[in-house]
Image (spheres, grey):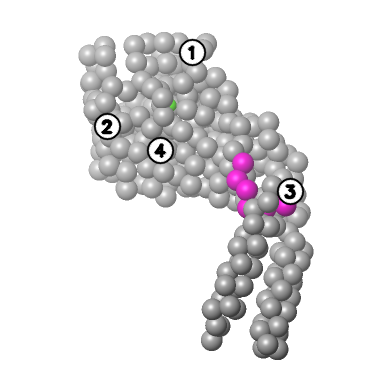
Amino acid sequence: MFDNSVRSRFIAWISALVAVLTMPEMNLLRADLVVVQNSGFENVAGSVVFNEFTFGPPVGWQIYNPNGIVVNNGVGPQFWVGTLRPSPPTNFFAVPEGQRVAILFNEFGTGNLGEYGLSQTLAATLQANTRYTLEVDIGNIASGTALNGQFFNLNGFPGYRVDLLAGGVVIASDNNSLAGSIPEGEWGASVVQFETTASHLLLGQALGIRLVNLNQVDASAPTADLEVDFDRVRLSATAVPEPSSVMMVGLVFVTGISMRRRRVWEQ
Ligand SMILES: [Ca+2]
Ligand SMILES: [Ca+2]
């Protein structure tokens, strides 16, 4: 059993350890936000504006179109990539950030033709000994009538994926983990985490983010249009101590404790 004196010293050592680990000079356990351009999709310069919608990729983002199905010209199968300025409670009960959200929309009859989405390559590069946390709000849009009077059946949810990339290679994903848990008209929080050690093949390569509509027909709503919405993209990087740093701090810690205990016993 520690007496009060030892307990107070123990607490002092724990406090000192925490202070050391969080010192800026040590660059340990400190989360830095990584710059994501237009992370809330409010900047739609250059897009086609139609009432509450804009069509075309929001500033800073590119259309991800691996199956060649996104045309965005109003002709043929309709796949619309752009933004929506909802008027709650129509479509959504709330907007996570600002006024606009990103939309990945395709009409009934074009489901199951493959995935598509938005992507962005960041200025930041993959760093060693770093924990990355990518957070995105995922929206399950509810059916509603647009300002032009057109009703959209948006029942169900076609599935989503959020990818974190380095050098164009996916290094971590949230593959539709929130499916079935976001009610119509509401938002869920997607989290993707990835941690590097001292070495990784893609260190120094540009980081990237990809937001995907899986475009899967929902069996509970087989005649609905298919849409996933996104907002509030955040990426943080936290330096994690190298094992050698941890061992050094731990050694100092244990040595300090044992010296303190020996002094107490010698009293
Ligand atoms: Ca927004
Ligand atoms: Ca829906």
Considering every residue shown, the one lying at the far bottom of the view is 266
**How far apart, in angstroms, are the residues tagged by discs 2 and 3?**
44 Å
Magenta extent:
25-32
Q: Amino acid at mark 4?
A: Ile
Gap in angstroms between the C-alphas marked 4 and 2: 13 Å
**Quadrant showing the C terminus:** bottom right
Asked if the stretch drawn in magenta spans residue 27, the answer is: yes
Of helix, strand and loop, which one carries label 3? helix
**Dividing the picture into quarters, in which one does residue 186 lie?**
top left
Mark 4–mark 2 CB contact (< 8 Å): no
Q: Label 3 sits on what residue type?
A: Glu
Which amino acid type is marked by label 2? Phe
Residue 224 visible: no
Amino acid marked by disc 1 = Ser
User: Which mark is on residue 93?
Assistant: 2
Q: Nearer the viewer, mark 1 or mark 2?
A: 2
Q: Residue furthest front?
A: 267
Q: Mark 1 = which residue? A: 47
Sequence-first tag of 4 and 1: 1
Q: Nearest to the eye among marks 2 and 3: give it.
A: 3
Q: Position of residue 205 (x, y in %)?
A: 73, 39
Q: Mark 4 falls on what kind of element? A: strand
Mark 2 vs 3, N-terminal side = 3
